[in-house]
């Protein structure tokens, strides 16, 4: 047997499952396979009468495991020194908050014949927004009785989160709620399934899911207290004792792989399976997050992650949606921030407004790259989908200012990119104000890989080097990292997450350094952005905005003559 | 000889000359002909090195007269009762301010061989903006020494106006300036040419041109005094005595048609030719302007005209660009207001942004017409080309607020139309605040004729019925009205402009009545528009704009559910 050791990471996304086998020594992926969900529309089951509904069937998860893991092993089989017996641990990440109603054995109600075809008995996918009214009530009640419950999740409870979904189920499908013994996050369900610990009392729940989505905090004894939950509904209060008292970070094993699953998947039985977490959080670990390093995943929206030591970092940062002890790197506060729309705004402009297809992105990018900062005289707010961090307000909308009769689609396109850069800078500034420095920014995601102009604008606008993650599939790599950590040093893995990251993560050779001239122009534009941001985003803030258009014209003139 | 009497109106536009022969009894056009200018680009001579330059050759004007007038007579010849001998008077309107340098005989320098091919010796077309710096200096000097000079033209002297052009000529082409004995507006040149009164001292100058573009005011003894003009340049000061002391309204005859021109054009010699005026002002007369009635010419920009009796109206209305005694209807203050861009904004959206051609206007109009007021959640400012009335500020730019990831081109199109409606309402409100009531609005121009949705939005947003002028060529009709007035009652014409208007002008059967439900929504949107208008348009104005996006979302929700 070779002395190489491998870890398996399994990443359950919105539309597919990806399994990767990673060389524990250097992070190299030796085998990977993807399984697309078969049910519904790319795995998502919807309700034609309610656009907010988005569900998944847990049978897609098990089918995904059974296809992707053996698939990855088959690919890895061609690698020198690889053997399934050398896989020392398993890590899991999933979307979230994606809770499933389960019975006393931990079996999803979705598998019970009486609930076949019942959307409410399925997994409630992260992007299900049917619980808007419930989320608003939770925010109101918590503000009134336990403001500390919201302190670490930005002051507003979201319809995407655990209790909004569970309560909405009680309101619209009481027969499902009553039949459920407990509710389990998808990221807890998979490790429990693999380790034979499905009984709700036995499941080691993820602190990432608990802390970011269910107002869990060790300091106040776990989940919100039963009295508070009973204010939502007495039945929710009664549910609390069938949920959990404690939650765990992913350096803890959820259990050992059962023989049955080892056989199904072609893995050694008995190897440890790490406590699960959300995809973005494991992705940050796979991209090399650490103290002073922010990982920015740029897609349709942005999800930015960093960690802060408990000594220097503040646990409560106004407008920051999630600060959870151990949710990213165990032993640190995990901080999750982000922008409600990034790529979605560019897509809206290209597809909906300019009536173009994908290739128009490249055309507009090429044209916009010819512009100097400030040259268009335009400025935008990146709020077409609201503002997540730092305003935590979904009821905000877009703004474009400075257009003339000659403004071109490419100028607006660049202004929208700049707006997302300024939105990102606003987040960085807020973190630093509260003792969370950001010295490095590591970017992931298709847009970061593909759009050099965007990366350069981000560097120029923030005054920080923009680096790119070396790994492409950072979520699965992060999961594999935790597989190696729960395996431990003795088995050829690692004792700490930081050690595992140091060996397996890295950045690409290409990076983007700020251009001092551009920085200077963006500093002026950002000042105007911030004034619009505060004027339209903060209650009670008043400002004389008369000079905003004049300043944009001055900066435009300077850019043209400079 | 029939007892029908006719009047000839000749309208010199930017690209062509139009002659119409009008039945003095009922305003019916019995003959019309158009001659397109031959020189340059549709009559406009430009400088490849300076986009602000726009000139015209006076030979195009004479060629236009010689083609269009006989052409109109030839068409009219088919009408029962018509004979050239029954034409009793001539009226003229032109673009402006369009001044020409002339010699002591009143002959344009453009006709002198030494200035052949010299752009600066041509007519300086209204849209020539080369005198921007000079206009700014004039504003500064007038603000300092004679603020009353600017009081009636809105507080800011424009680069489109007489003295900015003349001064700029002195600065860039002193040889032309020095060779010019005087400068004559195009609307003064044509009547003088036709009546043999070309000698600068003999020309009866138009009070419309003098008052709106050259700071002329009878109350302070005509043009700005020589001392003030010498502050621009001593040579401008010296020019004053070669300009004019008095200016006249168009109910006064400039003189009688010379035999030579009567023969060339096929008209009776000796008939009176009215003092000229600008096209928009005569257009207002032809559309039926009067006390309490605003005429709105909606094209690429809007030009709105009304009159006020000298007893009730105020001569100085802040932000109103022109209040001139007798410039529209003799005996009344003529008030000229307008929006810097209307159709131009819609064209920008359709052509530049959405990449569509003309027909996309109709597609977007049809789609936008399906929307209820407020339904899009959007609000725009109509400032893509600055704001003429009531802010008098070219350095303002566009603003769009409320966009989401689902905002459509048609929604923005409608929001831009609504923005121009709100801009128009802001003007109406300003007039009424200063004692100039607006009970009727009569619309002219292609957009008014073609876009019923726009007309309905204007009615709903302003709470006023929108009527359409019956005449299509209101400028030429207005000119013909003044031909009938200078002919006088004894010759079969009229003693007053009002009498002539009563007989010859009217509105169409189609009109647009405000819909009370829509009015109520637009009242809410206008309140938000006005707050953005004041926040971005007025120095020193500060407001908490936090609720603007929220209010738009509320109105959107109400529209969707209502």
Image (tube, coloured by chain):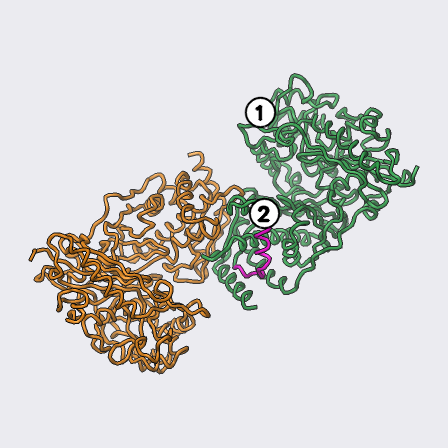
Chain colours: A orange, B green
| Residue A191 vertical placement versus B108 (above, below) | below
- Would residue B88 appear left or right of B408 to someone viewing this image? right
Give the prevailing secondary structure in the magenta stretch: helix
Q: Secondary structure at mark 1?
A: helix
Residue highlighted by disc 1: B172
What is the chain identity of the residue bearing mark 1?
B
Using the image as rendered, state which of residue A496 and residue A41 is in the foreground.
A41
Q: Secondary structure at mark 2?
A: helix
- Would residue B280 appear left or right of B367 to someone viewing this image? right
Label 1 Cα crowd, 10 Å radius (few <14 / some 14-19 / many 20+): few
- Would residue A474 appear left or right of B87 to someone viewing this image? left
How far across and down, in percent of the image, does residue A507 sit? 23, 48
| Residue B365 vertical placement versus A39 (above, below) | above
Using the image as rendered, state which of residue B378 and residue B21 is in the foreground.
B21
Quadrant for residue B209, please give it: top right
What is the chain identity of the residue bearing mark 2?
B
- Count of labels shown? 2
Q: Identify the residue shown where x is 38% and y is 60%.
A: A388
In the image, the segment drawn in magenta is B359-376
The quarter of the image holding the C terminus of chain B is bottom right
How far across and down, in percent of the image, does residue A129 sit? 40, 68
A302 drawn magenta: no
Residue highlighted by disc 2: B359
Q: In this rendering, do the residues under marks 2 and 1 share a single chain?
A: yes
How far across and down, in percent of the image, does residue A483 sit? 17, 62
Q: Identify the residue shown where x is 75% and y is 39%.
A: B476
Residue A309 visible at all? no
Residue B522 visible at all? yes
Q: Identify the residue shown where x is 31% and y is 42%.
A: A514
Task: Measure the alpha-carbon separation of dots 2 and 1.
Answer: 43 Å
Label 2 Cα crowd, 10 Å radius (few <14 / some 14-19 / many 20+): few
Camera-side mark, 2 or 1: 2
């Amino acid at each position: 047997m070779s002395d190489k050791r491998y870890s398996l990471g399994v990443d359950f996304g919105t539309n597919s499952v990806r399994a990767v086998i990673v060389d524990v020594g250097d992070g190299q992926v030796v085998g990977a396979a993807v399984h697309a969900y078969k049910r519904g529309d790319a795995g998502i089951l919807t309700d034609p009468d309610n656009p907010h509904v988005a569900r998944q069937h847990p049978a897609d998860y098990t089918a995904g495991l059974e296809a992707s893991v053996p698939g990855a092993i088959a690919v890895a089989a061609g690698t020198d020194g690889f053997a399934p017996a050398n896989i020392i641990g398993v890590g899991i990440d999933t979307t979230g908050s994606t809770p499933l109603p389960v019975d006393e054995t931990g079996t999803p109600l979705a598998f019970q014949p009486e609930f076949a075809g019942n959307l409410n008995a399925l997994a409630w996918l992260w992007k299900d927004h049917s619980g808007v009214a419930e989320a608003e009530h939770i925010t109101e009640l918590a503000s009134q009785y336990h403001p500390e419950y919201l302190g670490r999740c930005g002051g507003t409870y979201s319809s995407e989160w655990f209790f909004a979904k569970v309560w909405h189920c009680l309101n619209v499908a009481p027969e499902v709620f009553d039949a459920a013994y407990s509710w389990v996050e998808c990221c807890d369900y998979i490790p429990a399934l693999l380790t034979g610990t499905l009984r709700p009392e036995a499941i080691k729940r993820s602190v990432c899911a608990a802390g970011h989505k269910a107002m869990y905090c060790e300091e106040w004894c776990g989940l919100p207290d039963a009295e508070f939950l009973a204010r939502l509904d007495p039945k929710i209060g009664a549910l609390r004792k069938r949920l959990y008292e404690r939650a765990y970070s992913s350096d803890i094993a959820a259990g050992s792989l059962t023989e049955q699953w080892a056989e199904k998947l072609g893995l050694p039985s008995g190897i440890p399976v790490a406590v699960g977490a959300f995809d973005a959080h494991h992705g940050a670990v796979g991209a090399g997050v650490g103290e002073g390093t922010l990982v920015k995943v740029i897609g349709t929206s942005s999800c930015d992650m960093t960690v802060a030591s408990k000594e220097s970092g503040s646990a409560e940062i106004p407008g920051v949606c999630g600060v959870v002890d151990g949710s990213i790197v165990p032993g640190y506060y995990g901080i999750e921030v982000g922008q409600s729309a990034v790529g979605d705004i560019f897509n809206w402009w290209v597809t909906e407004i300019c009536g173009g297809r994908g290739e128009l992105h490249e055309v507009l990018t090429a044209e916009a790259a010819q512009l100097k900062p400030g040259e268009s005289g335009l400025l935008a707010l990146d709020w077409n989908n609201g503002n997540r961090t730092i305003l935590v307000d979904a009821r905000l909308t877009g703004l474009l200012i400075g257009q003339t009769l000659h403004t071109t689609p490419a100028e607006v396109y660049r202004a929208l990119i700049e707006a997302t850069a300024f939105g990102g800078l606003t987040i960085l500034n807020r973190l630093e104000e509260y003792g969370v420095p950001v010295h490095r920014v590591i970017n992931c995601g298709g847009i970061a890989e593909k759009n050099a102009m965007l990366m350069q604008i981000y560097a120029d606008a923030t005054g920080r080097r923009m680096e790119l993650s070396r790994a492409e599939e950072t979520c699965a790599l992060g999961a594999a990292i935790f597989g190696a950590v729960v395996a431990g040093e003795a088995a050829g893995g690692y004792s700490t997450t930081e050690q595992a990251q140091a060996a397996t993560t890295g950045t690409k050779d290409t990076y983007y350094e700020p251009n001092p001239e551009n920085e200077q122009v963006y500093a002026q534009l950002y000042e105007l952005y911030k004034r619009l941001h505060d004027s339209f985003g903060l209650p009670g803030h008043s400002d004389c905005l008369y000079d905003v258009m004049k300043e944009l014209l001055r900066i435009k003139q300077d850019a043209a003559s400079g």
